[in-house]
Amino acid sequence: MSFPFEWNPYADQPHNVAPRSERFRHHLRHAGSYFAIAGANLRRLVPGLRRYRRYMKEMHRVPVLIGPGAMSCAVSPAGPKDAEALDLLAETGVGHTRVRIPSWERGKLAEHEVFVRALRGRGFEVTLALLQRRSDVLEPDSWRAFLEEVFSRFAPLVSTFEIGHAWNRTKWGVWDHREYLRLAGPAFEIASRFGAKLAGPAVIDFEFHLYPVTLPRLPFDKVTSHLYVDRMGAPENRQFGWSAVKKLALLKAAVDVSARAGRDVWITEVNWPIAGTGPYSPAAGKPNVTEEEQADYLVRYYVLLLASGLVERITWWQLAAPGYGLVDNREEPWRRRPAFHAFRTLRARLEGSAFEGLGETDAPADGPSGSGHDPGAGTGAGPRIFRFRKNGRPFAVCWTPGSPVEHVFKRRVEAAFDRGGREIAGRPQKIVIDRCPKYVDFSE
């Protein structure tokens, strides 16, 4: 059954218009799909848990290279403001971006092509995310025609196509995993004709049980997740005992035991919505944070996850949006939020660097991270000090999710900088480490 599609232009997502009763009847009729999910997960449970335990044992204890393109920021067409959007995107320093193309905007593909060509002209690598709605599931010929036109137009311009979007939420039109398999399946034959690479399955949130029933049948070049943790607040906070890094370790384990061959993991959407933005926020209540908290959590999320070595790329959604973007585009000129400066500084620091370990020396690591506990969780005593080296020069990113602490560094400090890249006066050996990340450059 189909229902009128209603898009929420304020929060960039659909309204959930399908009646709960109809969704319940659908799930009841297709109860067999849940047995298939349970069976697929049970068969992989033991090897998956072994991998998960290995990843947690190694978490933040082995060196990791942070490659170029590890930090990405999505961007949307802005009409007459396209040039301003591209200038701000370039200011972040990213080399990769992600653009959404909804199936219901098939008549605007020429406009999207102009925007993507402008991005390519500025040197950006582009991933296209192809969004679906309920009618695409019910009218497969129309969806296939959309794919044909998208690939024919954009294959020469785009590095990767992400097939489908947050389909484990019924408001996006897909009501079970078998519907997603039918939706994504045709993309592989079409992509092969154009030499295009595909990414998916774009599952949102902490629902990794869906990978074992999709990846064996969908050989994506890159495996993607929309790993939001905003409902828990800080990325170190736990949901049913799971912090952001524990979720990532479980995700990578699920991917490893589900895909036919090793696959790199991309997180293609993450953000924290801003309190006080009213209808522009994509979530109500607890997930909304202050602009300062958004900037803090952004840095901590990227450092925690990229230093794990389990994810190749993380994309912030998105550059300009009143309710959650790095830039508030309600103002004239567009206002750079604290998260914009935090993102730009972090990208300049981390990309091309090597993560070397926790604490100031290799053994023992400072704080709870060196004691065998979850290295990305909790508010326990001790600062989080993540040690990197770039162009031969050592530096650290440090914060604490708990109460501020005064920390005296053992190594000689050359300079210290705040979250946005502003230098802290003097060469302070003693620094107050709090929830707002800081950068510390060391002498050799």
Image: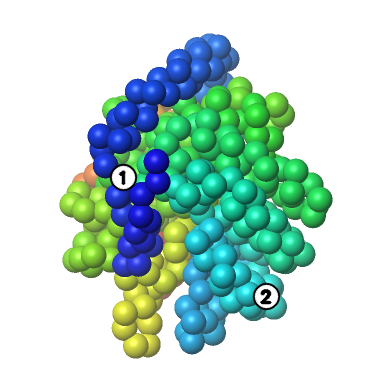
The residue under label 1 is which amino acid type? Ala
Quadrant assignment for the N terminus: top left
Q: Are marks 1 and 2 in contact (CB under 8 Å)?
A: no
> Which residue is drawn at the image coordinates 65% and 55% (left, top)?
145
* Residue hosting label 2: 117
In the picture, measured across the screen, residue 221 lies left or right of residue 29, that is right
Q: Is residue 250 above or below residue 320?
A: above
Label 1: which secondary element: loop
Mark number, residue 18: 1
The residue under label 2 is which amino acid type? Arg
Asked which quadrant contains residue 200, the reply is top right
Place of residue 203 in the rendered image (x, y in percent of width and height, measured from the top left): 48, 40
Mark 1 → mark 2, Cα distance in angstroms: 37 Å
Label 2: which secondary element: helix
The front one of 365 and 290 is: 290
Reading the chain from its start, which is encountered first: label 1 or label 2? 1
In the picture, measured across the screen, residue 52 lies left or right of residue 273, that is right
Place of residue 181 in the rendered image (x, y in percent of width and height, measured from the top left): 58, 35
Place of residue 354 in the rendered image (x, y in percent of width and height, measured from the top left): 62, 49
> Which residue is drawn at the image coordinates 54% and 47% (left, top)?
139
Q: How is the image coloured?
A: rainbow
